[in-house]
Image (cartoon, helix red, strand yellow):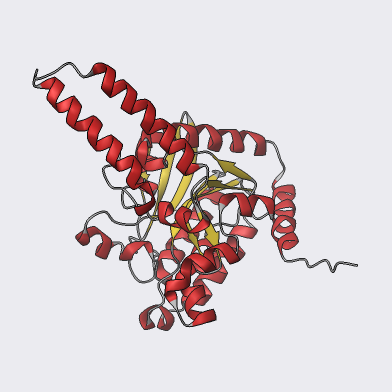
Amino acid sequence: MSDHYLEFEKPIAEVEQKIRELQAAAAAGNLDARDEIGRLEAKAVHLKQDIFSHITRWQRVLLARHPQRPYSLDYIGRMAEEWFELHGDRLFRDDQAIVGGLAQIQGKRMMIVGQQKGRDTKEKLRRNFGQAHPEGYRKAYRLFQLAAKFHLPILSLVDTQGAFPGDKAEERGIAEAIARSQFIMARLPVPIVVVILGEGGSGGAIAIAVGDRVMMLEHAYYSVITPEGCASILWRDAGRAPEAAEAFKLSSADCLELGIVDKLIPEPLGGAHRNPDAMAETLKREILSAFEDLEGIPPESLIAQRSDKFARMGRYAATP
């Protein structure tokens, strides 16, 4: 269970702190607090249900960025009985903002590629806060092509605010790398399942999100820009990020309604970080089900359906 609370979770934090204090006192033999603990636990559940049934889009963004939210490697470690990581783009270096490798989940072999943030300061710097350079995307599509060569399905796990926007990334061709990754994914003759785990930001996300089935966790978001970036452009004020989040409908429910994703995957009450094991089990079930649905579809049909799926998102129908 998480011990890090967001601002809107303060009522929950207060109740759970009381529960911990009573449990500590009971463990020390100072009092019998079973009835009071039970009452407070029921109150905590009620508070969570009430708060999380009315959270705003901005609060979902905060949940997607929660420092204890599980990342790609956390899920891979829980879901896969076999995992062999592969490194490098064969051109420049190994970008650790993107991880990838061969895996087996419940007997099904696949290639997994995912974006990875860091936990502590050292790892955050090493993984560049999950913001990939061009070589990260070149590594990703190298692994996609390797999967196609050996007829392996692909699982792509998205979790980034966006591709790295620095001058070095521009010099090494970040735009070209993102575009080529999308181009290659669109033409791969193997099933592709995409899951947006937390943040799905801009080209950095879509670069590895061209799939046959695209799913989102309940408290993830998916958008062309971060709310802060949008607010800075529109109003010259990043502080209006909550307003921007409401305006451009970035939540999983919004994306499902708009046809941007195919399925919303529910999270444990309070968010995935509250029960990573349960979240991983749910995610594994949904991933395997999606791959099962795609089995038997001829490669040419997969490619045609995938292309049409994304082309539909760009169609504009004028109202009469």
Query: Is 62 placed left or right of 217 in the picture?
Result: left
Q: Position of residue 151 (x, y in %)?
A: 57, 44
Residue drawn at point x = 40 percent, y = 69 percent: 135
Q: Nearer the viewer, residue 31 or 182?
A: 31
Q: Quadrant of residue 296?
A: top right
Query: Is 86 placed left or right of 180 in the picture?
Result: left
Residue drawn at point x = 52 percent, y = 75 percent: 176
Query: Is 40 placed left or right of 232 in the picture?
Result: left
Q: Position of residue 188 (x, y in %)?
A: 62, 54
Q: Quadrant of the C terminus?
A: bottom right
Q: Position of residue 285 (x, y in %)?
A: 52, 31
Q: Position of residue 160 (x, y in %)?
A: 43, 60
Residue drawn at point x = 31 percent, y = 21 percent: 38
Q: Quadrant of the N terminus?
A: top left
How many numbered discs, if any? 0
Q: Nearer the viewer, residue 199 or 20?
A: 20
Q: Quadrant of residue 3?
A: top left
Q: Is residue 80 visible?
A: no
Residue drawn at point x = 46 percent, y = 47 percent: 112
Q: Residue at the right extreme?
A: 320
Q: Is residue 260 visible?
A: yes
